[in-house]
Structures are given as C-alpha cells and as structure tokens.
Image (cartoon, grey):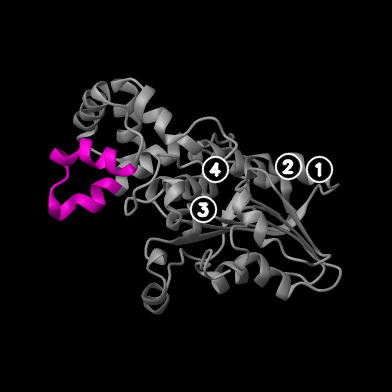
Amino acid sequence: MSNYHSPVLLHESIDALAIKEDGVYVDVTFGGGGHSREILNRLGKSGKLFAFDQDPDALANEIDDERFVLIPENFRYISRFLRFHRIKKVDGILADLGVSSHQFDEAERGFSTRFEGDLDMRMNQKSKKSAQEIINNYSEEQLAAILFAYGELRNSRKIARLIVHDRGNKKIETSFQLKEALRTVLPKAKEHKILAQIFQAIRIEVNEELDVLKEFLEQVPNLLNEEGRLSVISYHSLEDRLVKRFIRTGLFEGEPEKDVFGNSNEPLKKVGKLIVPKPEEIKVNNRARSAKLRIATLKN
C-alpha cells in the first residue's frame, strides 16, 4: 500500500470523521486503501465502509473485509451507487483529492513531468479523452483558456501558440515532446514549476476534476446524517477554494440569499480550523507539502 500511495494527513482526516463503531462511511478516493484501512480499524463489527475509485489499478488494493465494499466508479456518482446498495444516509465522507503517488510514478500514465511517457493523464483508463487529444486537437483559444483557468499561467496564450505551432510539424505524443515544444518558455530556474502548472491544467481538463468535485460537494448535504462529517484533503488552490466556499456558503460563486430577517440557508458549517501536515510528515512524504484538510458537518 505504501508503495502505491502514502496516505496524507491520515490520522487527522480520519479523526475528523468522529467515527462511530456502528456507522456507515464512504471513502470516495480509495487509491492504495490507506485511509480506508484506518476507517475499518476504528469501525466495529456492525459498521460499514463503501469506497470509490475509477482507476482499474486501484482495484488490486481491494480489502478483504465483510464490512467493506469497493465501487469501481467516479465519485461524482456517489448518490446513485449508494442508493444501489440501499444506503440513503451516511455518517461520514472522506475525499483525498488529486493524483495518487502510483499514478505519478507510472511513466506510461503520463501524469509526471519527470518521465518520458505517452501524454495520457486519464484517471479512468476507459475514458476516451486523453491529454494527447487535448494537446493535438484543441484550438489555440481553448488551450489558452484551460492553461489560464486550471494552470493559473499568465502567459497561457504564448504557451498555447507554441503548442499549436509545434504540432503543425509533428503530432505531440509524449511528455518530453511537449517539453521540447515549450523550451523557450521554460527557464531553468522555473522549469519544474511551470511544467507542473501546465500538466495540472491538462490533467484537470482530461478528468473534468473541478466539475466532478462540484457535483460531489452538491450531493454531500443530502447524504450526511444529522451529525455526519465531511473530511476533504485538497492539494491546489483551485480545489481548496471550491471546498472552502461550498462549506461557507453552499455555493461556488455569488453569495447565498437572505430572508427578511437576514438569515441564509447554507447546508454545511465548518468544524475546527484548516489543518495542514506537520513538518515531520512533509519530511517523510514530500507530496504532503501542499495538502489542506477542511472539515464540515450539517448546519443545524
């Protein structure tokens, strides 16, 4: 499991769920199963844990436990598949967003800037849209838009122009070919940072990550029991802003409407303060450095 993915903020995120021994819980990002195993450790014999993961590689980590059910689907469909298992309400939901260590470390998956590999980046390998399709088929305007919105790159237009020019000569199929196409906008001192932003933008577009997160969050209030908890770990500002805003307002933009008495009807309320990894954890697992944990429960 640790070779597949080292769970970030393991104890903090599971503590946040305030687990009841006979409760029903959901881990929507199963991965290597680290968080799921810790939830099962705290559940009693009558407890139940459902987990989601759309990546076929993660299914090999399935846990042999009668209290555990692994659902091989995207967590945007959480309500639908819980209903299939006759579950209407749960006591806690955990989401560890982003890419697993396994996905980053497998060169052929195309997630990492470190390896030469096909531009793929699909979390669900059955999905039709890959990074290669986006790089080679999106218009210059479309590329610039996703690089700006999802990579927060100020020179998104210049990067898009370089991609379109280079692919006019030869199809861009691998991560190193993409790097070569962009060499003029990758100064040595900032190469890794800029490439990470570019790869993040393409990955988010491939997997519709922000749309998935929004759809998931909108379902949470109707799924939680009265004292149920939501525990979400995010790794970049785009995710974290959505999570923070939804917990605060129940919306992703604008402000909630107020009644004549000045009261609004947000579905959730935050529990405690923002939690980040301790220096000791970051030293052991560098990928924890950008993690942020937010906790919420239903508003009374």
Kind of residue at badge 4: Leu
Residue labelled with disc 1: 83
Residue pictured at 67% horizontal, 55% vertical:
59
Kind of residue at badge 3: Leu
In the depicted view, which residue is nearer to us: 225 or 117?
Answer: 117
Magenta span has 192? yes
Q: How many other residues sit within 10 Å of disc 1, few (<14), some (14-19) or many (≥20)? A: few
Kind of residue at badge 1: Arg
Going from N to C along the chain, the mark reached first, 1 or 4, is 1
User: Label for residue 97?
Assistant: 3
| Left or right of residue 297, residue 226 in this image | right
Q: Classify mark 3: helix, strand or loop.
A: loop
Q: Classify mark 2: helix, strand or loop.
A: helix
Q: How many other residues sit within 10 Å of disc 2, few (<14), some (14-19) or many (≥20)? A: some
Q: What is the distance, in whole Å, between disc 1 and disc 2 at their CAs?
A: 6 Å
Q: Are marks 1 and 2 in contact (CB under 8 Å)?
A: yes
Instruction: Tell me which segment is drawn in magenta.
Output: 175-195
Q: Are marks 2 and 4 in contact (CB under 8 Å)?
A: no
Q: What is the distance, in whole Å, between disc 1 and disc 4 at their CAs?
A: 20 Å
- Quadrant the N terminus occupies: bottom right
Residue labelled with disc 2: 79
Magenta span has 253? no
Q: Are marks 2 and 3 in contact (CB under 8 Å)?
A: no
In the depicted view, which residue is nearer to us: 263 or 88?
Answer: 88
Residue labelled with disc 4: 213
Q: Classify mark 4: helix, strand or loop.
A: helix
Q: What is the distance, in whole Å, between disc 2 and disc 3 at their CAs?
A: 18 Å
Q: In the image, residue 225 lies at what x, y percent?
A: 75, 54
Q: In the image, residue 116 lies at what x, y percent?
A: 34, 48
- Mark 2 or 3, which is nearer the eye? 3
Going from N to C along the chain, the mark reached first, 2 or 4, is 2
